[in-house]
Image (spheres, coloured by chain):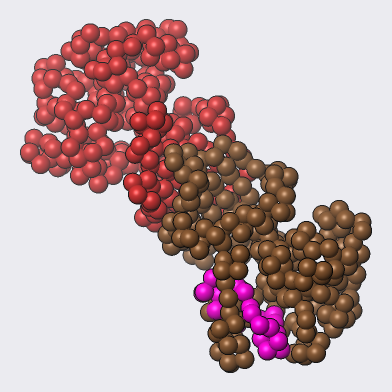
Chain colours: A red, B brown
């Protein structure tokens, strides 16, 4: 049995490997070639342990998550967990991985695959609203799939850009790419071909201005609750399609739920990644 | 997070530590100081993954088992698994252990605790019917709690005593203890103060003879199905008490179910380990 540390996980695969795996997972989902029971939740008080097994052809993956609401007050992550792989034909455990690293890899790669298929081939600039760990990984993957020359950053809360730029450039290892901190979202939008938001925002992070937003490719990963949104109505009016992973996203994320309910986003514009690939 | 190998697990604790832990677990169970939801089963065809979480004061333990019925045909264990410990206050994973080693430790120690409390203090001989891995561990613990000088072995199927004696004496590391292979169960019973059975038997492994069995302490661990039994009716007639772990054992094991149903074992004689300690 292999136990992979944080570093070993990042060394074991390239960014392209992870994006290819994401594409494979879309294709497995589309073919229905898996068995995935509902997740199992064990709880004591407000603390929860979640077990999420999935049987695939070669492996059985179990994501085991601990959700401890008091953790952030102690400087610990709200969610943490492990990914355990067993061989599908024998059930023998074969690998254990850090769940947080895997989630960062996966979420970053999902954005990367979206950019692979949806952004202009010649996009040379990417803007990031929300300079946290999720955002950092989004940028890594964006730079792996498009000939990015400039990265623009904006964060409404954390203004310690030098620290984030240091972390990002260390991880990127690409001295040819310029990283700029912006004083406003408008400045960031104007400079960037691709716009990524990775925030906890409840209100749109971009102005509701079609002229400003026209021609851009948006990746919005922060809005995972029905009452949260990152994209203004202007995006719904401008785009020909919005791609998401699964139908329940239309209820789960405010970026789809809110414009669908108000009617500004027609249901026909919502498409699925697995149908694109 | 610690990942303990088979060897590290055996090095990390003494036999007495494991038996003390078993006694602690009885006391925790008696006090009700735990939260344990029903086990969760995910299956594809006949293959199953089982998740068994339990919240305790300091830790959350999750036993994760794979039950693959075709494995024995391939020389692999029917059951295999992992034990995962998370901190109870933060949910952070802190240790991963080999489930088979833990099961062997646990099952052996349960027999050891029974002997601690129920066998004569001066018992110097122990007999084992069923020379497999479970039986080997039973003997290790028996020798840790009583001044054993002689071990007697009998197996109805596997007659390769030299190989088993070699394994057992290596693990025991006690050249002062003599190990004998017996040609019959009767010979084994006559020689032994404590009698341990660890078989897959469906019929009693000892003769139904009160005179032969009188005055012995019995540990029967093999009978974990309603139709299997290791102990003859004579044992029910002779003993003042039979101790088990949990009430459902009265239905789950033939050693209790069969004599209870026939009436040879009065319900009042069945007691629980947690009440003894």
Please tell me which residue lies in front, A69 or A134: A69
Does A121 sit above or below residue B273? above
Residue A121 located left or right of residue B156: left
Residue B277 located left or right of residue A158: right
Q: Is residue B230 magenta?
A: yes
Q: Is residue B120 magenta?
A: no
Residue B37 pos. (x, y %): 42, 59
Residue B23 pos. (x, y %): 61, 59
Residue B247 located left or right of residue A216: right
Q: Tell me which residue sits at (39%, 19%) in the image.
A: A143
Does A190 sit above or below residue A139? above
State the image quarter where residue A242 is shown: top left
Please tell me which residue lies in front, B120 or B267: B120
State the image quarter where residue B76 is shown: bottom right
Q: Tell me which residue sits at (35%, 49%) in the image.
A: A45
Give the magenta part as a residue range.
B225-250
Q: Tell me which residue sits at (71%, 87%) in the image.
A: B238
Residue B179 located left or right of residue B32: right
Does B62 sit above or below residue B160? above
On the question of residue A83 being in view, the answer is no
Residue A247 pos. (x, y %): 25, 46
* Circle count: 0
Residue B151 pos. (x, y %): 86, 68
Please tell me which residue lies in front, A246 or B153: B153
Quarter in which the C terminus of chain A is drawn? top left
């Amino acid at each position: 049995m292999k136990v992979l540390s944080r570093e070993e996980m990042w060394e074991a695969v390239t960014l392209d490997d992870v994006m290819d795996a994401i594409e494979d997972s879309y294709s497995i989902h589309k073919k229905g070639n898996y068995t995935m029971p509902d997740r199992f939740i064990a709880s004591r008080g407000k603390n929860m342990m979640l077990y999420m097994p999935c049987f695939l052809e070669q492996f059985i993956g179990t994501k085991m998550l601990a959700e401890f609401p008091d953790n952030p007050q102690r400087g610990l992550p709200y969610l943490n967990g492990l990914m355990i792989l067993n061989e599908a034909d024998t059930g023998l455990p074969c690998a254990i991985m850090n769940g947080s690293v895997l989630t960062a890899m996966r979420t970053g790669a999902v954005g990367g695959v979206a950019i692979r298929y949806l952004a202009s081939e010649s996009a040379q600039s990417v803007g990031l609203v929300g300079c946290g760990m999720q955002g950092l990984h989004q940028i890594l993957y964006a730079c792996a799939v498009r000939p990015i020359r400039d990265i623009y950053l904006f964060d409404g809360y954390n203004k310690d850009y030098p620290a984030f730029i240091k972390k990002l450039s260390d991880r990127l290892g690409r001295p040819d790419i310029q990283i700029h901190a912006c004083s406003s979202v408008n400045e960031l939008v104007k400079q960037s071909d691709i716009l990524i938001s990775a925030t906890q925002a409840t209100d749109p992070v971009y102005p509701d201005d079609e002229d400003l937003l026209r021609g851009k490719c948006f990746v919005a990963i922060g809005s995972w609750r029905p009452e949260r949104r990152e994209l203004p109505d202007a995006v719904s009016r401008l785009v020909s399609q919005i791609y998401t992973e699964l139908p329940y996203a239309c209820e789960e994320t405010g970026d789809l739920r809110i414009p669908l309910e108000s009617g500004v986003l027609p249901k026909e514009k919502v498409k699925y990644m697995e149908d694109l690939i």
